[in-house]
Image (cartoon, rainbow, N blue to C red):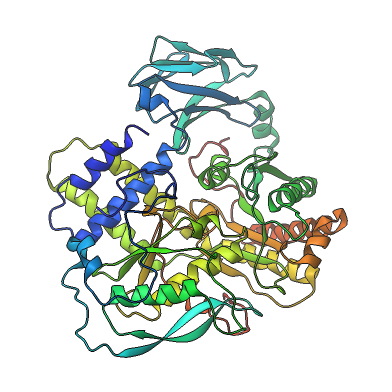
Amino acid sequence: MGSLPVRTDSVTTRPRGERSPVRHLLSALIAIVGLVILATGTGAAAQTGQPARVEVSVDATGPSTRVVLTVSRPVPFAVTRSGKRVEIVYSEPVILEPSSGKVDDPILDAWSQEGERTVSLRVGRKFERFETFELRNPSRLIIDLLGRKPSQAESPITGRRSDAPRTIIVIDPGHGGIENGAVGPTGLKEKEVALDLAVRLRRALERSDVSVVLTRDDDRLLSLDERTATANLNRATLFISIHLNSSRRANARGAETYFLSTDASDDDARTVAALENKAYNAAGTVEARGADDNEELELILWDLAQNQYLAESSRLAESVQRELNVLVGTRDRGVRQAPFRVLTGATMPAILVEVGFISNADEEKQLMSSEYRDRIVEAVTRAVRQFLSGRAQLGVQATPSVGGGASQP
Amino acid sequence: MLAVAGSLVGCGSGGDDSALQDTAGAPQAGPADETAVPTVEGGEQPAAAPLELVLVTVYFPSASTDGLQGEHREIFNTSPVERAKQILSDVIAGPEEAESLPALPSGTRLRQVFVMGSGLAYADFSAQLRDGLSGGSDAELMAVYAIVNSLALNIPEISRVAILIEGQPCESLNGHVDLRHPLAPKPSLTSTGEPERII
């Protein structure tokens, strides 16, 4: 984390005009937290001055071909097109891993490293254009190569909607790795039950015409931002985080479904602080716009991402809670709101389901049984179907158009 | 400024807080801590002696229903920061009635409290608040809002609360509740026997 103290200084010592010390502190705090997030995964490279590593992954299964370049630490870059190549030029030397590769795809032929700073994508015959967007934590550049794949060439003629937006549901089994989550009286672990439920839920949902992506499919620790980013990266239609609860209350039992609570005044304060920053920079101090400002703004945008989906998140939560109430059959519980971190940055309806209290001996016992798990999965699946069909009737597109690309003809 | 200049990883590495006195003890009317943050504390001064007592409601998880339950306590009517310390000491000390449960892991200590003129309070706890918490969002929500509600619903000068661990900003105590930003109180979490309902 060698670069952090330097950046911290630049945040806290920059002249801020008439801003109150509180604002100053708050925004410094926000910026610092942002840097902490950003720093996750930067590893030792930044410290030792070694070149950043760039990992390549290619997904050619969709209608567009997606290239994801995951950088070991943020490095400025530019993307250009020249003839049959799309080139990503970094501002400093990088190491591409793997350094080259071939793809069996009419849109992308191959990729390779050219010189110290350039990643070159050799595009295929069917390539038409590209779109890019960035994600953080870890720092990623996503390049969508758009074109006309053979399977799609038929659809304009027949008028079939083979390119209709797919419904993608990202399911997030809570905790994992060193993080056990809640542990029951006889030792049943939240991380294990959540993963098993997620796998079962994937199976059940895929029987409908739904694609399911899990944030983790093994016993692995993920940061909260990574979980949300998986949903955003996949342009998911819905994000469902699966958890099991625990309480000191001996009689605590039953399911609880949450969507994000946002304190409006908080958001207002953050937005105002961000706008002030922008205005202040624009107004005059001629300073190289460091990465700080962008990061600060992006952090704020991330924090506001879920706000526009709250109404839908609430409906999804209600649907799930209703079904789980029927399953548990104890009492009429309503949905709840809490400032859960994993829901914050989601750019789609997002909920966190506490399917039961693992701390309750009776529920722990139930949760051990495969049959009860299936019943939970059935309930959630039914709720998701209800929500999706209600949404379809309202004419909401299944796939949000964030970033574009996925639903191009 | 504040204690954010050290390690920036997660919510503090815990352990050594020998530099700070244990502030979780009896209420101190003296101005000792005011010097810690002269720039943000403003003109805040402890109230003049003799100190009167005021009644406050300290929140703990209910033993029987969802949410928090209030218990009355008397504290000295001193400065906001001193009142905050007294209230958090009461939260740490735990409930007196059988109807309530402890909100915070045993062994949790209060390190510092700052109250800004804007209504933002920073409550800095030892790592035990994070490390001693059992998994599960309920336990986490109860701990966080026992702190936030007890402060913000009793002290008019406090409207939002930021929780720090070992002097550091903390993303989350246990992977659920977002602590990167100050939290406003949730009066709806106060137990009425009815669950919170959203329309």
Q: Residue furthest top?
A: A115
Q: Position of residue B141 (x, y in %)?
A: 54, 66
- In the foreground, A281 or B113: B113
Q: Position of residue B180 (x, y in %)?
A: 41, 55
- In the foreground, A17 or B143: B143
Q: Residue at x 37, y 27 (%)?
A: A46
Q: Position of residue B183 (x, y in %)?
A: 41, 66
Whether residue B90 is visible: yes
| Left or right: A224 in relation to B167 | right
The answer to which quarter of the image holds residue B195 is bottom right
Whether residue A78 is visible: no
In the depicted structure, whether residue A184 falls above or below residue A145: below
Q: Residue at x 44, y 64 (%)?
A: B109
Q: Position of residue B137 (x, y in %)?
A: 59, 62
In the depicted structure, whether residue B70 falls above or below residue A278: below
Q: Residue furthest right?
A: A371
In the depicted structure, whether residue B151 falls above or below residue A59: below
Give the number of marks.
0
The answer to which quarter of the image holds residue A406 is top right
Q: Which image quarter holds the C terminus of chain B?
A: bottom right
- In the foreground, A261 or A83: A261
The answer to which quarter of the image holds residue B120 is bottom left
| Left or right: A125 in relation to B170 | right
Q: Residue at x 41, y 24 (%)?
A: A45
| Left or right: A263 in relation to B113 | right
